[in-house]
Amino acid sequence: MAEDVGPFCEAGIVTGLGGCCGTGNDHIQALTKMSAAYKPRAIPTVEPLMRLSGLEPLNYSPDPTNMRKSFWNVGERCNVAGSSIFKKAIVDNNYDKALEIAIKQVAAGANIIDINMDDGLIDSLAAMTKFVNLLVTEPEASKVPFMIDSSKFEVVEAGLKCSQGKCIVNSISLKEGEEEFIKRATIVKRHGAAVVIMAFDEQGQAATEEQKVAMCQRAYKCLVEKVGFDPQDIIFDPNILTVGTGLVEHNNYALDFINATREIKRTCPGCKISGGVSNLAFGFRGNEAIRRCFHSAFLHHACLAGMDMGIVNSAQVIEDAYDKLDSELLVYVEDVIFNRREDSTERMLEFAESLDPKSKPTAVRKSRRHLASKSLNSGPVPDYKQWTSPLPRSKCFDQLDAVMKERIIMIDGATGTSIQGYKLEEEDFRGEYWKNTHTI
């Protein structure tokens, strides 16, 4: 036995040896004598990274020089709040269709699949359990980690119990106080999952940069010092809120998120930043060119500030590369994102009217209505000959024309005026032409 185990000790990969129910003291003595000539395995230095897994490992190695390149796309289509098709599949108990949606997301480039069943028409706990149990049997989808997403912690726990590998919990917050926050964080840690922390506390949702930073710093301190959470597994969501609503107090929401991201990454070492990107331009839903341009432009600048991942339409954000966006549209969009002008939203709305709502931000088309309006003034007026009446002029035309220019002419009212003025009888005004005409 000692001879068989010897090569492992020689390779330097053994830390301890022992016997089992079939070994005795002589086995232990032989192992001890053999192993005395070798050094135990040296403990390697493990680089501090976020390490997740589905069937396959997913280790996060951010590229500080290009955070957009190392950005993790969290697929949003298995969320009943984000996809009407997925919601219908779950409500109709059509889980085959729901699984197809998950598989397509991974094929389209999703690094992680977000799963959310929170809806009044759905038993979210039962649906989460059933869907995750089915999803782990589909290797083309379950090869990536899951993000178990629910506002109900019992649903989160149900998803955790069914998930394989190491997933992400989305989310917990300080909304119900530190005691409940620490309790839930401890449960998540026991399951071995990473966790998303929403920027909420007992007073409500963080909207300004200062609120976002303060809430995340408080949560970080609780997680690291009281729960013992690995900072690499802490993901903050500082709330991507909707801009372009027409309300002045909303104008700085995008810029506040970007600035807060930079400060949170600086003051909470090891943490990650995520967010629901589709919330940003919710007011422009229905206009694909504008919404998608908002998403791509925002991600570009948020990643420069240190954003690590986000819940997105994976295929679209990959296709809509920042350097391929329509330059004219990008100016209007970034005016809103950075709140560069007081009239940014009004100008954006006006410009939106000129776009085909189904076009892409990398290939913007003008709307037909806009083109029709523009064509009225699209060139000079052609030269035409002066119009003249085609009717022939009688011999008396010039005489009448000259008189009518000098004075107001008087016109006899048929033959009634002459009859009464000259006391004419019928035979008198019949004339030669009508003198033999029969009268009644």
Image: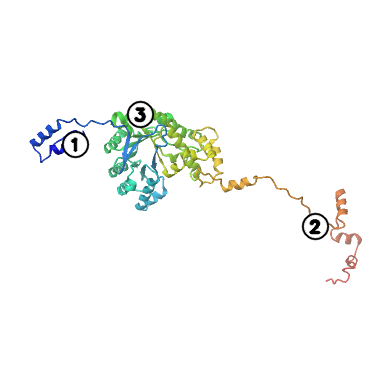
Q: Is residue 192 left or right of residue 415?
A: left
Mark 3–mark 1 distance (CA, rounded to whole Å): 39 Å
Disc 2 marks a residue whose amino acid type is Leu
Q: Position of residue 384 (x, y in %)?
A: 73, 49
Mark 3 lies on a secondary structure that is loop
Q: Position of residue 120 (x, y in %)?
A: 37, 47
Mark 1 lies on a secondary structure that is helix
Q: What residue is shown with label 3?
A: 269
First of labels 3, 1 by sequence position: 1
Mark 2 lies on a secondary structure that is loop
Disc 1 marks a residue whose amino acid type is Phe
Q: Is residue 221 visible?
A: yes
Q: What residue is shown with label 2?
A: 391
Q: Are marks 3 and 2 in contact (CB under 8 Å)?
A: no
Give the residue displayed 66% in from the left and 45% down from the top.
379
Is 411 in front, or is 122? 122
Q: Are marks 1 and 2 in contact (CB under 8 Å)?
A: no
Q: Position of residue 164 (x, y in %)?
A: 28, 43
Mark 1: give few (<14), some (14-19) or many (20+) Cα within 10 Å: few
First of labels 3, 2 by sequence position: 3
First of labels 1, 2 by sequence position: 1
Mark closer to the observer (3, 2) = 3
Query: In the rendering, which numbered label is found on residue 327?
Result: none
The correct choice, above or below, for 235 with respect to 55 in the image is: above
Q: Are marks 3 and 1 in contact (CB under 8 Å)?
A: no
Q: Quadrant of residue 55?
A: top left
Q: What residue is shown with label 1?
A: 8
Q: Position of residue 295 (x, y in %)?
A: 46, 39
Is 262 in front, or is 83? 262
Q: Quadrant of the N terminus?
A: top left
Mark closer to the observer (1, 2) = 1
